[in-house]
Image (cartoon, helix red, strand yellow):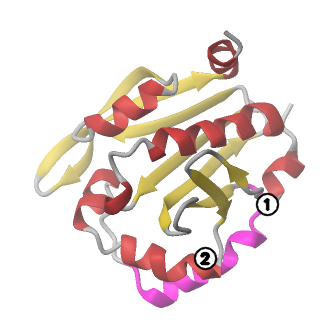
Amino acid sequence: MINAAAVATTPTLTGPRIRLVPLGPEHAEAVFTSLQEPESNRLTGTHQTFTRAAIDAYCASRADQDDRLDWAIEDVATGQYAGGVSVNEVDADNETAGFRIDLVESHRGRGLGPEAIELMLAHLFDEVGVYRVGLEVYAFNPRAQRSYEKVGFVVEGRERGALLWDGERVDAVLMGLLRDEWKARHTS
């Protein structure tokens, strides 16, 4: 059973190297800057461009959302914005959720993504009460797929040609993780 209160308020979660903090107005500049990175946009399949005003409004509205969780990933050592994690598509009837993560270029390749995902999963499975967490990753992002597999996600299928990027069709790889699978990895 989904604990709606655990979705209505985004907690701060702390790991060894990162901290997930509620995304807010103080992160708007860093989020806007990260959205100017062409490689980040390619890896996430982000076609649209965003104005600073739109990002300011988005970051300011996160505390008002009671059906999703939006975190900024901060480097514990420096306090720098390292990226973001959003839990969306929370389906209380089926006890499922989806998520997306993005890391700024300067923080990629350091294992911070898996650490952020583990913190998020612990919250989703232990506090929110979801049974299944799903995601999609584009086929041209094998590094991300390996990161998801590292924390227990398994490939469940493909959406062929789901993204059109620079004139080429790219598959979306569908991945999922069940609570029982995650718990088995953390009790041994």
Q: Tell me which label, 1 or 2, sits earlier in the chain.
A: 2
Name the residue type under label 1: Asp
Which residue appears at 43% of the width and 25% of the height? 149
- State the quadrant of the C terminus: top right
Q: Identify residue type, mark 2.
A: Cys
Can residue 173 be seen here? The reply is no
Circle 2 packing at 10 Å, graded few (<14), some (14-19), many (20+), is many
Q: Report which residue position mark 1 lands on.
A: 66
- Depth check: 58 or 123 in front? 123
Residue matched to label 2: 59
**How far apart in space, not on screen, are marks 1 and 2 (Cα)?**
14 Å
Residue 84 placement (x, y as % from top left)? 52, 59
Q: Is residue 1 above or below residue 4?
A: above
Residue 1: image location, x then y, percent: 86, 31
Residue 140 occupies which quadrant of the picture? top left
Q: Which residues are magenta?
A: 50-67
Residue found at x 38% / y 77% = 33
Q: Is residue 144 above or below residue 5?
A: above
Give the crowd class for mark 1: few <14, some 14-19, many >=20 residues within 10 Å.
some
Specify the quadrant of the image occupied by residue 92.
Answer: top right
Residue 181 in percent (x, y) is at 63, 15
- Image-based side of 97 in relation to 102, left or right: right
Q: Which residue shows up at 57% across the image and 24% down it?
A: 177
